[in-house]
Amino acid sequence: MRATALLLALSLPLAAQSLQVLSGAADYQVFQRGPGNNATLRLQGTAAGAAGKAVEARLVAAGLPVAGFDWQAAGKVSGSDWSAELANVPTGGPYRLELRAAGASAVTAVSDLLVGDLWLLAGQSNMEGVGNLVNLPLPSARVNSLDMTDVWVAAEDPLHRLPDSNDRVHWRKNAQGQPERLQGEALAKWIANRKKGAGVGLPFALEMVRRTGVPVGLIPCAHGGTSMAQWDPALRDQGGDSLYGGMLRRFKLAGGKVKGVLWYQGESDASEKAGPLFERKFREFIQAVRADFGQPDLGFYYVQIGRYVSGASAAYWNLVQNAQLKVESQLPNVFMTGCADCELDDGIHVGTDQFGLLGRRLANLALGELRRGPRPLSARVKGSVIEVEFAEVNGRLTHAGRLYGFTIHDAAGNPVPLIYRQRVSRANPHVVELLFGGKLPEGATLYHGAGRDPYVNLRDEAGMPAPVFGPLPLQQ
């Protein structure tokens, strides 16, 4: 019997000794590189007709074996299962990973693998992307995305597709008010008719690759119209029935380690009830993400909410903007940029043609090569001039056309039209001079970008914008 079984095994065609990959790597997957600028790939699967055989692997790039990664023993078949490990795969790609049972002619391959940096995209609509689907950036072989059905794909806009996500929290509600996944013909029709969906994720990734050459993997998790309450970390145990739980699940699915988080949210909290709580909730959210990701120093990069063409009261809009500015200085490795100077594609959403600019700003922060951009230090009254000094300026302050965006307000917060000229000081390129006429009201303060739809154009030479801020006390 034993001899007969051995004879049958030996008579199996070598091609039948095949491997199937079940976990550990998929086409277009991006692996987070470690401190050694490389990654370890650990794979598992099933095997046919190869019990006891060694598993061999090789790595191919541009049609040729990668140096040091030609066919080599990487694991073993045990019964009908196998596992393998390929260590120290260098940053780069796209790679083709080939696997075989030792001595077999059948080769199983996983294609378009990348080793680089993973970035998680979260927040509400301006991170989800509601820009017009026109003049979109060209994809790159070095930028892939874990789509919302949990499949790795080549990254292209729109990155977010909520209606058929694997996380139920993103589904639309049906006539009975229950979440229902869009599928079949209805999904195909929705995709075909989609006119919005461009966002900042892809332009950011393309800019990072352009500057560093390091591949990027994106993990889209944003959802338009959502508040900090809906992103509550306390809902983590609900898994895909909550935004936080779904984000945490996808983080683990992508390998359980990321380079950083890109966040754009706050518009839904600009209200009388939620606005005063935003600063605390946002700070606690960042801390919870770092704890749950097991990365206490995780880089967190976010955008101060920008413009909203609306006649509604701006008090809480500006309150959220100021809270975002404060949080930046309350936690380490947290960085904010602005987009109040960006053009829109509708009343509230950043335009597709502006995401290149915003992507560059976020890349500036992520790479740590530049200062954050102009941050207000003080506003001093000297005769009929208010001198506004800024820190964190890259080069000098600059602006296109007539400088605009500063306003004087009385103690009650009402704007008082006194400023007749705004300019960058010739004596100090980190100071803005505001020339005003008339008497300053008692308790006067200074704002930059007050209101929901301000016109602001103050930047530094690196293109980093001055944030919306105020009230800033006027020092006599």
Image (spheres, rainbow, N blue to C red):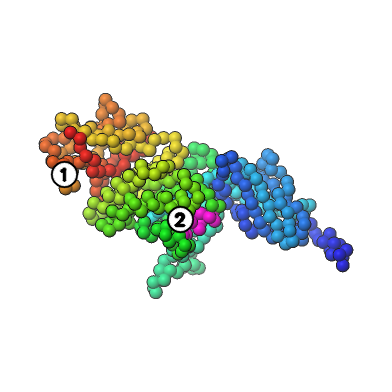
**Of the residues shown, which amino acid type is indicated by label 1?**
Asp
Between 358 and 408, the one lying in front of the other is 408
Tell me the quadrant of the picture where the N terminus can be found.
Answer: bottom right
Left or right, 274 with reference to 206: left
Q: Which residue is mark 2?
A: 221
Badge 2, how many Cα within 10 Å: few under 14, some, many 20+? many
Q: Which residue is mark 1?
A: 410
Q: Main secondary structure of the magenta part?
A: helix
Where is residue 320 shown, x and y percent of the image? 30, 50
Image location (x, y in percent) of residue 81: 70, 60
In the rendered image of this protein, does residue 201 appear above or below residue 390?
below
Q: Position of residue 138 (x, y in %)?
A: 49, 46
- Badge 1 element: loop
| Residue found 46% across the figure and 44% down from its top | 297
Residue 21 image point, x, y percent: 66, 57
Q: What residue range appears in magenta?
A: 245-254
Residue 9 appears in the figure: yes
Q: Is residue 448 magenta?
A: no
Foreground residue among 270 and 127: 270
- Given the image, on which type of amino acid does mark 2 rest? Cys
Query: Residue at position x 42%, y 50% from top?
Result: 287
Front-lying residue, 96 or 20: 20
